[in-house]
Amino acid sequence: MDFTSLALVASAAYFLVVVALYALSAQSPICGFYARSLASWAALLICACYGVISSVALRISGYGGLSQWTTARAFKWTMRLFTGVEFVIQGEEHLKTRPAVFIGNHQTELDVLMLGAIFPPYCSVTAKKSLKWVPFLGWFMALSKTVFIDRSNRNNAMAAFETAAQHMRSERQSVYIFPEGTRSYTAKPEMLPFKKGAFHLAVKAQVPIVPIVVANYSNLLHLQSRRFTSGKIPVKVLPPIDTKDLSAADVDDLVHRTREQMMRELVAVTELARSQRVALSSKEASEANGVASGADHRQRAEHRTTQAVAAT
């Protein structure tokens, strides 16, 4: 069996496994978790392959800065089709800020889909240097002007940021960074401490910071509980924060002010989402259902009492 035939057989088997797991998900939620997880990896691979091809074509035609935007949009629609998860954005007008350093809270791997939904044209991400050598995904990132950071070497990391700052000024290219540095996997509206790289970059380039806050979505995806369901997740894009005339001495205060603002918005957008029965943790969902059931029970009891009184 040649490679092409083997690849087709493997793809067909993968597809059938995902379909079977989806079919079983109504009876077994854990099947839904594995179905959407496998579908997500398939979407990522498909869109990474597309990204390699589109990045080459766009660079040849002189529009290389659009590579990550067009691939992000492809991933957005592919993932919505495969998993039923959608990010709903408020404040989209702020995504037009260019160039800018966009920053956001980082919860799980599903944030890649969030990037697909919000990613503006002429923007690129930063990534750890080791991802550069991952087949397909790394090739796409290398071709699409990703800023690779060597986290094990501070001097190399700062040099990469210096190069990125110069590129931002000359090409008007924006950058998206998760300042927490890693995924939090939290079930609460909270964030890890911020690293300063994104803020140093914004100050070096003298471009605004645009904070993006994603409501906690642990009811839709919570890896520890093996839960992955469909639904809508609110995202709020905050107004740009100006860095003009700021210096490295101002970075600590900038980090503090920005994180405090994002924390307030994170709590608010999550509370609003949960009041609308979106983005509830499993415990909160259970408690909410219990409260609702209790209220329904009391209403039925009161209704029966009223009917009994009326009958007498």
Image: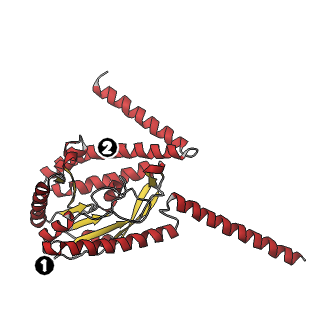
From this viewpoint, which residue is outermost toward the top? 1
Can residue 140 be spotted in the picture?
yes
Q: Is residue 78 left or right of residue 160?
A: right
Secondary structure beneath dot 1 equals loop
Q: Say which quarter of the image contains residue 194.
A: bottom left
Q: Badge 1: how crowded within 10 Å, few (<14), some, or many (20+)?
A: few
Amino acid at pointer 2: Ile
Residue displayed at 50% across by 38% down: 20
* Numbered-mark total: 2
* Residue 282 image point, x, y percent: 52, 57
Give the amino acid type for the residue marked by disc 1 in the picture: Asp
From the top left corner, tell me how far across and down residue 3 is, in percent.
28, 26
The answer to whether any part of residue 227 appears in the image is no
- Quadrant, the C terminus: bottom right
Residue drawn at x 42%, y 37% is 15
Q: Nearer the viewer, residue 34 or 106?
A: 106
The answer to whether 224 is drawn above or below residue 87 in the figure is: above
Look at mark 2 in the image and give the residue it sits on: 46
Q: Quadrant of residue 252?
A: bottom left
User: Regarding mark 2 in the picture, which secondary structure is present there?
Assistant: helix
Is 44 on the left-hand or right-hand side of 232? left
Numbered badge on residue 245: 1
